[in-house]
Amino acid sequence: IKHFFVKPASPADTVRIKSRVVDYEDRGGCVKVTLEDGTEAFGDVLVGADGVWSSVRKIMHGLDEGAGGDAASGAAGGALDEAEARKMARDTVRVAQKALRRYSGFTCYAALANHKASNIEEVSYQILLGDKKYFVSTDGGGERQQWFALIREDAGGVDPEPTPENPTPKLDRLRREFANGDAYACDQDGKVWDGFALELVDATPEEDIKRRDLYDGAPLLATWDPKRWLAPWASGRVAICGDAAHPMMPNLGQGGCQSTEDGYRLAEELATVQHTKQTAGALGSYSRKRVFRTSIVQGFAQLGSDLLVDFDLMMTIPLIGPFFLTATQLSMPWILRFLYTPEF
């Protein structure tokens, strides 16, 4: 996106990478930002779109040191290489506690496989469900398949390092977890999986598979400060958006969608500013208009993730199970319309 949409149309040094914000100061008439390399920058507005471990959010909400910065996250693995991911996996648990983020209960293996799925002509998106885990695949275009394997387990886990005896530890684990009766007769729960999961896993090189624990978090902090409730994602000339404001589980494909809606609403509100003194009010309006919708979407994403692996258990509960199933069926048209109708 940077290279195709921003860089060609922008002056030199407008877009920079490895420029993490370590501090900012809202001076009333402008915002002063200090970057990790010591560079200072000034602007009318600072928008923290710096992810689930947002440094801007940490400063805005006065969170403890260590609540922002680098940590391993993201369903698709992000840009971290394997060595970095392994090093950060356990540190992320500590960072999450300080950042008031919630571990979803799932670790996620993900990859984009250069493989034309055997059923691609009939199915472009599918989910395979099991006990404490599930497998998701979607058409990645160009005879590629994006897949995710989500497994319920404690946070901070890492796979063994490759050895001559086992050069592919991630592939080996996934073949055990989603055993289809070939290499392994069944998984640890005695279940045999549809062969489609391993069709995609086996088409993926070990080095292309990324693993991350998945974290989300409420859009509001646990606080009695009325200012935080009136505009939880904005303070003065500073605002946050995207995963910095509302990280969510990937089940509904809404993380990027809600971030896009954030960007549109930010632009719309800032377009109303006639004088710089109106900037803080515009950012506060953006925050108030967006927080309700994203809170609902976050809730659906987490509920959907849990129910995917607990649905059979839910159905065994007398009265509650049938009631929940009926309520879900009746409400689903409204839920889908709400989720997939953009609200700018």
Image (cartoon, grey):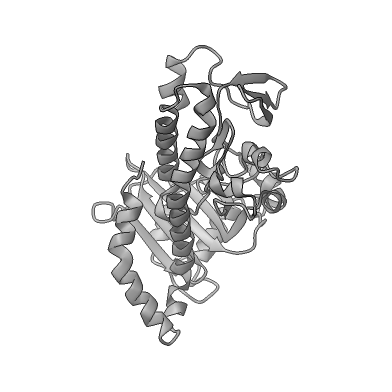
Judge whether residue 206 can be spotted in this image. Answer: no
Quadrant where the N terminus sits is top left
Quadrant where the C terminus sits is top left
Q: Which percent across, then down, holds residue 275?
A: 49, 21
Residue projecting furthest to the left: 121
**Which residue is at the front of the view, 209 or 219?**
219
Q: Image height check: is 73 above or below 197?
A: above
Q: Write the residue at 41% across / 50% down.
A: 253
Res 319 → quadrant: bottom left
Q: Image height check: is 332 above or below 66?
A: below
Q: Which percent across, then down, holds residue 171?
A: 54, 55
Judge whether residue 37 can be spotted in this image. Answer: yes
Q: Image height check: is 297 above or below 274?
A: below
**Which residue is at the front of the view, 146 or 7?**
7
Q: Which percent across, then down, holds residue 137?
A: 39, 54
Q: Which percent across, then down, holds residue 33?
A: 65, 25
Q: Write the residue at 35% across / 45% down.
A: 343
